[in-house]
Amino acid sequence: MSSNSEHQIAKQETIDKVAADALRPVNIGWGFKIWFALLAIALGVCIYAYSIQLREGLGVTGLRDFISWGMYIATFVFFVAASLIGMLISGVLGLIGYDWIKPIGRIAEIIAVAFAAIAGLVIVSDMGRPDRLPFVFMYGRFQSPILWDVTVVTTYFALSLLLYYVTLLPDLAISKDKLEGRPKLLRKAYEVLSIKWLHKNEQYRILYRIIRILLILIIPTAFAIHTVTSWLFAVNPRPGWDSTIFGPYFLSGAFVAGAAAVIIAMYFFRNNYKLKDYLTISHFDKIGKLLALVSIVYLYFNINEFLVPGYKLKKFDAIHLQALFVGKHAILFWFTQITGLILPIILLFFRKMRRPIPLTVISVFVLIGAWLKRYLIVVPTQEHPYLPIQHVPEVFKVYTPTLIETAVTAASFIMVIMIITLLSKLFPVIPIWEVAEDIDKKALKENAEKE
């Protein structure tokens, strides 16, 4: 038997092994049905809460005339932030040529699709008249940052979904004949979605070209989505928002939130889907270093964002900073900065802290801190308008989220989890063809070195 034939047999065996491991969790069993039913029930309760808001108006929330943005907008900014991880992992690191990202690339893309898909719905929950949403598209003005935001969010979601699908094509073709015992509808879906993929060299050449084009397109779109979101605040002269660095400030924070979300997902898939051979300790170590790097950059922007106005200490900046540092928001502010940013950076310098369990725990605190940080960006600034608050009820002066508002916000997180659950249970979370190709290249390199 020729060496080429032996190589082809070994390559096919590698593909079969990776496919068997990746497809093992692809099964709609009772565990999945119970979990999804619980999510559906919880979502139903939250939708009922939204129906009350829709019927009664935004008065059932903590939003009032002076503080008109609260948990909803904070969650929107958080979702946009978390969605950018797909660009960082697949786009930036993928184009640079880091092979270690291949097993986690699809996880990052799933997270990007899920968060980007729901981000727009979060904006709808903040609208008192959601029936007027079509007017944004019908009568949108180019001068309005709202129109820019809607455009880039929609474009980024479309590109993320397309990137997820095209990288899935070879896996669908590989897997469609390996789904014994799965529902017929799922097998039929694999056959239809694979669009007659035959694993020909010309098909792969076209696929690589398409992926490269999408990655090149998704990078400026991802930068635009969070830059434009930052402009929703920065074009306003309010203290706390009036900043020329809000774009990179938001962008660096987005990478922190997204990296933490990917780490949590990696840990879950590694243990529950039995993928320890593919999501290794080395992968956690490397992405832990990535989280440390982006956190340090984000810490720099945090220091800059508070040091400059703190040094000049204009009247209204002083009021805003006092509320954050020693005032009513001080506990939340320092908890967010210390447990969500400073301590994680320190801990991530130690190799033992970049192992799966401690890294996941750190990422949970980072992700919680990321949402709280958006809350602190959105709410405190509105409590200190330039014009004095006079002759209004006491409740107009403070913002306290209501139970209905919290339930509607929870609905967005539930929908994100539902999308991630569906995509990870219906399709392999490990890119079979890319991982098998990487294993094959390493095997050829080892054989060449031995010879």
Image: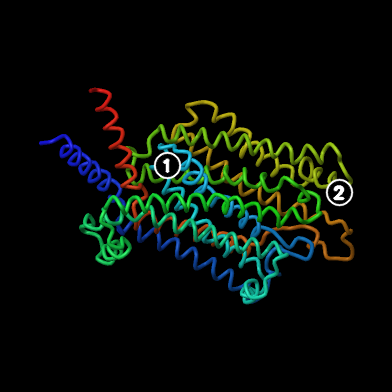
Q: Secondary structure at mark 2?
A: helix
Confirm or deny contact between disc 1 and disc 2 (CB under 8 A).
no
Q: Amino acid at mark 1?
A: Tyr
x and y percent of residue 15 in the render?
A: 25, 45
281 up-or-down from 63: above or below: above
154 up-or-down from 208: above or below: below
User: Given the current orientation, which residue lies at the most extreme top position?
Assistant: 450
Mark 1 Cα-neighbour bin, 10 Å: few <14, some 14–19, many ≥20: many
Q: Is residue 157 left or right of residue 167?
A: right
* Residue 33 found in image quarter: bottom left
Of residues 210 and 52, the one nearer the viewer is 210
Q: Quadrant of the C terminus?
A: top left
x and y percent of residue 377 in the render?
A: 71, 50
Of residues 393 and 78, the one nearer the viewer is 78
Of residues 344 and 227, the one nearer the viewer is 227
Mark 2 Cα-neighbour bin, 10 Å: few <14, some 14–19, many ≥20: some
* Residue 274 found in image quarter: top left
Q: Secondary structure at mark 1?
A: helix
Q: How many marks?
A: 2
- Mark 1–mark 2 Cα distance, whole angstroms, equals 44 Å
Q: Amino acid at mark 2?
A: Phe
314 up-or-down from 77: above or below: above
Q: Which mark, residue 316?
A: 2
Q: Is residue 33 left or right of residue 244?
A: left
x and y percent of residue 236 in the render?
A: 78, 56
Q: Quadrant of the N terminus?
A: top left
23 up-or-down from 358: above or below: below
Q: Which residue is mark 1?
A: 267
Q: Which mark, residue 290?
A: none
Residue at x 27%, y 56% (from the top left corner): 173
x and y percent of residue 275 in the render?
A: 33, 42
